[in-house]
Image (tube, rainbow, N blue to C red):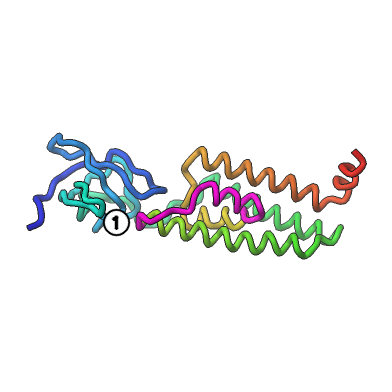
Amino acid sequence: MPGARLDGTLISWNDDRGFGFIRPANGSRNVFVHIRAFASINGRPQVGDPLEFRLGPGRNGRIQALDVRGTGLVRPSTPRPAGRGAVLGFVVVALFVGAIILSNSVAALHIGMITVYAVMSAVTFIAYGVDKLRARSGRWRVSEATLLVMGFIGGWPGAIIAQQLFRHKTRKASFRRAFWGSVALNLLVFAIIATPGIREFISRA
C-alpha cells in the first residue's frame, strides 16, 4: 500500500539538474526530490513551494519524495518575459549577422567560415535541447565544457537562441561568465580572420 502523504516545503532546487530537497512539515529530515516525481505542479518548481508527497524508494533504492503535488500554487503558466540577458543575446546575434553581411560585401568571406558558423550553431542548438531533456529525465547530461567548446568554435549564435527558447543555462553565473568569455574570444578570432587590415597588421608585426 502507498505510504501516507506528507506536507512540506521545497527548500532547495537545482533547475539545471532537475532535483532538490523538501523540508517536511513534521520536522523530520530533509527529503530528496527529483523532477520526475512531480505529478502535478504549475510551472517549474521553485524554492518556497508548498508540496504534498509520499515517501518511497527511488531508482537507486534510497528513500525520496514520490508523487509530489503542489498545494496552493498560483504561479502563472505563461513563459517569463525575456530579461536583459535575452535582449543582449539577441542583439549580439543580430549585430554578428550584420557584421558577416558587411564583411562579405567588403572582403568576400570564405564560404567555409560562414558554413562553420551555420553548422555549429545548428549542432549547438540541438545539444542544448538534448541537455535540457536529459536534465528533466535525470539521464546523463551534456557537459558544460562541451557546450562551451561548441560555442567557442562557432556555435554560440545557436547557443544564445537555445538558451532563451529552452530557458536553459540562463541562471548559473559561472557558466554565463565562461560562455560570454568564449563568445568574446570567438569574435576576436573572427575579426582577425575577416578584416584584411588586421590580418595585414599582424603579418607585418
Q: Residue furthest left?
A: 1
Measured from the top left, where is residue 165 in percent x and y? 50, 58
Magenta residues, dominant SS class: helix
What residue is at 19 percent from the left and 47 percent from the top? 63
Front residue of this view, candidates 57 and 40:
57
Look at the image and tell me in which quarter the N terminus lies.
bottom left
Q: Is residue 137 above or below residue 169?
A: below
Q: Return the residue at label 1.
A: 36
Q: Position of residue 53 (x, y in %)?
A: 18, 50
Q: Position of residue 144 (x, y in %)?
A: 51, 47
Q: Which quadrant is the C terminus positioned in?
A: top right
Q: Residue at x 32, y 49 (%)?
A: 45
Q: Position of residue 44 (x, y in %)?
A: 35, 52
Please identify the quarter of the rendering in which residue 116 is found.
bottom right
Identified at 35% across, 58% down, the residue is: 137
Residue 76 placement: quadrant: bottom left
Q: Which residues are magenta?
A: 137-156
Above or below 187: residue 125: below
Amino acid type, residue under disc 1 in the picture: Arg
